[in-house]
Structures are given as structure tokens and as C-alpha cells.
Image: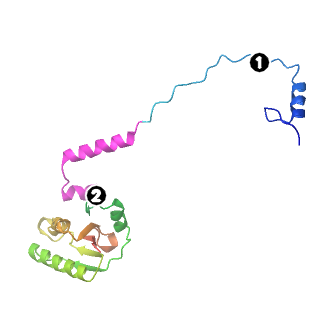
């Protein structure tokens, strides 16, 4: 076993190194000083912009149904305390639609009654995801949807409704909602 020096080199290698650099002239130490200042913390610009946008939106008030259609904002609801992921999964078809009800052509009282009866039956049968077709209001006076906003309010008032969102185009689009019920 070879004897080692304090620098970790074997004794004979250290001697060889000293012999090799014997005539070398050491460099003068540099007058350069390393930077000790730390860079400033990052500014969360996107968070600030998001907060500003939320404030402006809250001051502007709720959008009318016409405005929300123009801006591409779709109706959605998520019960307080549930993760946003639930709504994302509902939109993406994570749950299979197990039944549907069509409220076309009904007046408000008939539609509310049929919706309550339908949802009650779905809960008894243990269904989790259903579609509610309320229509787009194209045949309503002034071509304004009568049931659309009402159905959204009725659903949001029910304890057994966890979430709802606009149905995909192939399932009714803006004339229908996908509804997630309590298990």
C-alpha cells in the first residue's frame, strides 16, 4: 500500500508534481471580487394580472346570457368544497351519461316539476351523470331562452347536484347540461 499525502495524492506522485512545477512562477492574485449581491426575487406578474382581471370582472357584474354566449363562456356550476378537477372531468366525459330528460316545449311549472321528478328517479336508481335538455330558446318569443337560466338555478339549489356544465356539441351543446349527482 502506498503512503498518501494530505492532498490525497500518493507520496511519489506528489514528489513528481513538485519537481515538475519547481521553476514555475506563481500568478499574482486577481483583483477581481466575486459578486455577493443576490438577484431580486421574481415578480409574479401573471398572478397580479389574474387578480386584476378578477377584480375588474367582479366590478362589472354578472354577464347576461347573450354576453356569455358571445364571449364563449359556458354555464357551469361546482358545489362549494369540491375540486375544480371534478368539473374538468365532467366536461371531458369522465362519467358516462346514464339517462336524460328533454324539457323542450314545456312551460316553467311543467319543466320544474318534470326535472324534480326525473332527478329524484335518477337518485333512486343510483345514477351519477345525466343530461338535461332545456333547449336554446330558438322558438321562444324574442328567440330568448326561457328555461336555460331557470334550469341552471333549479339545479344549483339542489343538494344532490354536485356539478353541471354545458353539454358537448354532439349532446346538445348550449341547449343542454351535463349534471353530476351525488353517489
Circle 2 packing at 10 Å, graded few (<14), some (14-19), many (20+), is few
The residue lying at 82 percent from left, 33 percent from top is 5
Q: Position of residue 80 (x, y in %)?
A: 25, 60
The image quadrant where one finds the N terminus is top right
**In terms of depth relative to the viewer, which is nearer, 149 or 37?**
37
- x, y percentage for residue 105? 15, 77
Return the residue at label 1: 27
Q: Tell me which residue sits at (79%, 36%) in the image.
A: 8
Callout 1 secondary element: loop
Residue 73: image tag:
2
Q: Residue at x 25, y 71 (%)?
A: 176
- Residue 2 showing in the rendered view: yes
Using the rendered view, name the quadrant where residue 3 is placed. Answer: top right
Q: Residue furthest left?
A: 109
The magenta stretch spans which residues? Answer: 43-72
- As drawn, the label of residue 8 is none
Q: Is 21 colored magenta in this rendering?
A: no
Magenta-colored segment: predominant secondary structure: helix
- Residue 89: percent from the left, percent from the top? 37, 66
Callouts 2 and 1 close, C-beta under 8 Å: no
Amino acid at each position: 500500500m502506498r503512503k498518501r499525502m494530505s492532498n490525497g495524492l500518493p507520496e511519489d506522485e506528489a514528489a513528481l508534481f513538485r519537481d515538475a512545477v519547481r521553476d514555475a512562477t506563481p500568478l499574482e492574485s486577481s483583483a477581481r471580487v466575486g459578486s455577493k449581491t443576490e438577484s431580486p426575487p421574481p415578480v409574479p406578474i401573471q398572478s397580479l394580472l389574474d387578480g386584476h382581471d378578477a377584480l375588474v370582472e367582479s366590478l362589472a357584474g354578472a354577464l347576461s346570457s347573450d354576453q356569455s354566449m358571445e364571449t364563449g363562456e359556458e354555464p357551469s356550476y361546482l358545489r362549494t368544497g369540491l375540486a375544480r378537477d371534478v368539473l374538468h372531468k365532467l366536461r371531458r366525459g369522465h362519467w358516462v351519461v346514464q339517462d336524460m330528460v328533454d324539457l323542450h316545449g314545456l312551460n316553467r311549472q311543467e319543466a320544474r316539476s318534470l326535472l324534480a321528478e326525473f332527478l329524484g328517479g335518477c337518485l333512486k336508481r343510483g345514477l351519477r351523470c345525466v343530461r338535461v335538455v332545456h333547449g336554446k330558446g330558438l322558438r321562444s318569443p324574442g328567440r330568448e331562452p326561457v328555461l336555460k337560466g331557470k334550469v341552471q338555478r333549479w339545479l344549483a339549489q339542489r343538494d344532490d347536484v354536485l356539478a353541471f356544465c354545458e353539454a358537448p356539441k354532439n349532446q346538445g351543446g348550449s341547449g343542454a347540461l351535463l349534471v353530476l349527482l351525488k353517489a
